[in-house]
């Protein structure tokens, strides 16, 4: 079984496209082809049913933490009703459930966890810093969970200081997807106000590794040394020029005369330089804030409750794609005695790379666990074999009926 450090577990192909590929590649005709299509749809439907319950559970837990919630409350108290007035213990318990459910969901969607230490290492390994200088205080966060999926390169335009009239294109290392869960400690962080009970969920795309800190609530833009020098240099040189002129005049006409002649002009000059430097500082900050807002606008995929829905859809598709690929390759290409897990892993990766541009590192253990749970494989002496289409169709029919009767997405207290 091959292990690829530079490949992803994520299968980034539309489930519908994978379904069409398998149906076109199978070579079956008539009833057999139709039955294979129904089996693939049943596999997907069973995973959808599983994730519906997860979805409702996470929405129920998240409703009291959602900054965007606009739900009405009941006039009369109902039994087992979700209440906004929870004790601190109940609130912490719900928060733990939300965080654990969010993490489980991300791992189903093949995301990987990382920390601020990882972000610092990415920045230190980068030869040139790209993006804005942003300051965040980790002490402001009560909860911080960060996950990413996929590493890529994006283009950035840059001007060299020795050739400012020419813009060159460079490739910057970035994350294809970035998911964040944040809960702030205090209600006020810098100039921003936050409800300490709210939990922010964010999902972004194509984020440069050195710009991750821009995505957090309460992030403050900091001026670079070059910006500070461009603001401070005119002030220092201007004031130095004024002092030089004062000393020159003093040497000629004396202290009393210069005090009477230059008091108001000096005040106006210093005031003018002060206003100019403040205006330059404000303009530079506004320019950086606009750039950060632009990045957040175009790179934001979803926020808060929408992140749960988006990730659930992605997790369900990932699970379905893995099971569909594993079962089909065993059914169509494995010999009658079956394959070892290593052989199946290698063949699925080969099959995928032959039909799509991207290579993957297939998660064979996870795939076999799903197929065992669905009852679609048989195992003997270390070999794995797919059951025939007729048996698979009957098993999935029975499993669908049983799952439908068991399904209770809205809670066991109905």
Image (spheres, grey):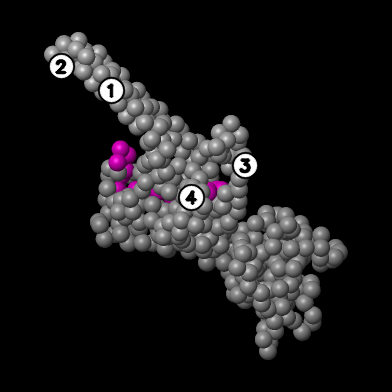
Q: Is residue 191 magenta?
A: yes
Q: Helix or strand or loop: what does disc 1 sit on?
A: helix
| Lower sequence index among marks 4 and 1 | 4
Q: Of all residues shown, which one is farthest toward the bottom?
A: 381
Q: Position of residue 243 (x, y in %)?
A: 26, 23
Q: Residues within 10 Å of mark 2 (few under 14, many from 20)?
A: few
What segment is highlighted magenta in the picture?
190-209
Give the residue pinned by disc 1: 244
Do tag 4 and tag 1 residues touch (Cβ < 8 Å)?
Answer: no
Q: Which residue is mark 4?
A: 210
From the viewer's perspective, is the residue at label 3 or at label 4 nearer? 3
Residue sitting at x 46%, y 38%: 292
Which residue is rendered at x = 27% and y = 54% of the image? 86
Label 4 and label 2: CA atoms lie apart by 56 Å
Q: Quadrant of residue 193?
A: top left
Residue 199 is a magenta residue: yes
Query: How far apart are the two marked residues, 4 and 1, measured between alpha carbons?
Result: 44 Å
The residue labelled by disc 2 is: 255
């Amino acid at each position: 079984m091959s292990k690829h450090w530079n490949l992803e577990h994520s299968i980034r192909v539309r489930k519908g496209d994978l379904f069409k590929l398998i149906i076109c590649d199978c070579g079956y005709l008539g009833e057999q082809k139709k039955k294979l299509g129904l089996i693939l749809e049943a596999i997907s439907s069973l995973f959808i049913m599983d994730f519906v319950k997860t979805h409702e559970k996470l929405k129920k837990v998240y409703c009291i933490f959602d900054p965007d919630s606009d739900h009405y409350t009941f006039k009369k108290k109902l039994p087992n009703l979700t209440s906004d007035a929870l004790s601190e213990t109940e609130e912490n318990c719900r928060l733990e459930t939300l965080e654990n459910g969010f993490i489980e969901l991300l791992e189903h969607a093949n995301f990987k966890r990382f920390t601020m230490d990882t972000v610092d290492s990415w920045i230190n390994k980068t030869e040139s810093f790209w993006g804005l200088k942003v300051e965040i205080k980790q002490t402001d966060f009560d909860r911080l969970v960060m996950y990413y999926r996929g590493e890529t390169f994006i283009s950035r335009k840059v001007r060299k200081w020795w050739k400012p009239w020419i813009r060159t294109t460079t490739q910057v290392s970035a994350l294809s997807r970035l998911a964040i869960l944040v809960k702030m400690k205090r209600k006020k962080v810098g100039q921003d106000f936050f409800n300490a009970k709210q939990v922010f969920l964010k999902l972004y795309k194509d984020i440069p590794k050195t710009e991750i800190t821009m995505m957090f609530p309460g992030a403050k833009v900091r001026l670079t040394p070059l910006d500070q020098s461009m603001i401070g240099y005119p002030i220092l040189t201007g004031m130095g020029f004024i002092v030089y002129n004062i000393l020159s005049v003093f040497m000629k006409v004396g202290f009393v005369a210069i005090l009477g002649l230059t008091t108001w002009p000096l005040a106006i000059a210093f005031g003018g330089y002060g206003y100019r430097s403040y205006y330059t500082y404000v303009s530079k900050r506004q320019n950086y804030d606009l750039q950060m807002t632009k990045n957040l606008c175009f790179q934001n995929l979803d926020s808060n409750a929408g992140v749960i829905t988006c990730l659930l859809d992605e997790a369900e598709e990932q699970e379905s794609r893995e099971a569909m690929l594993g079962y089909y390759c065993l059914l169509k290409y494995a010999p009658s005695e079956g394959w070892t897990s290593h052989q199946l892993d290698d063949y699925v990766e080969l099959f995928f790379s032959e039909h799509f541009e991207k290579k993957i590192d297939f998660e064979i253990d996870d795939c076999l666990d799903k197929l065992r749970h669905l009852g679609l494989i048989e195992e003997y002496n270390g070999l794995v074999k797919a059951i025939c289409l007729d048996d698979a169709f009957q098993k999935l029919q029975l499993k669908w009926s049983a799952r439908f009767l068991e399904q209770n997405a809205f809670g066991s207290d109905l």
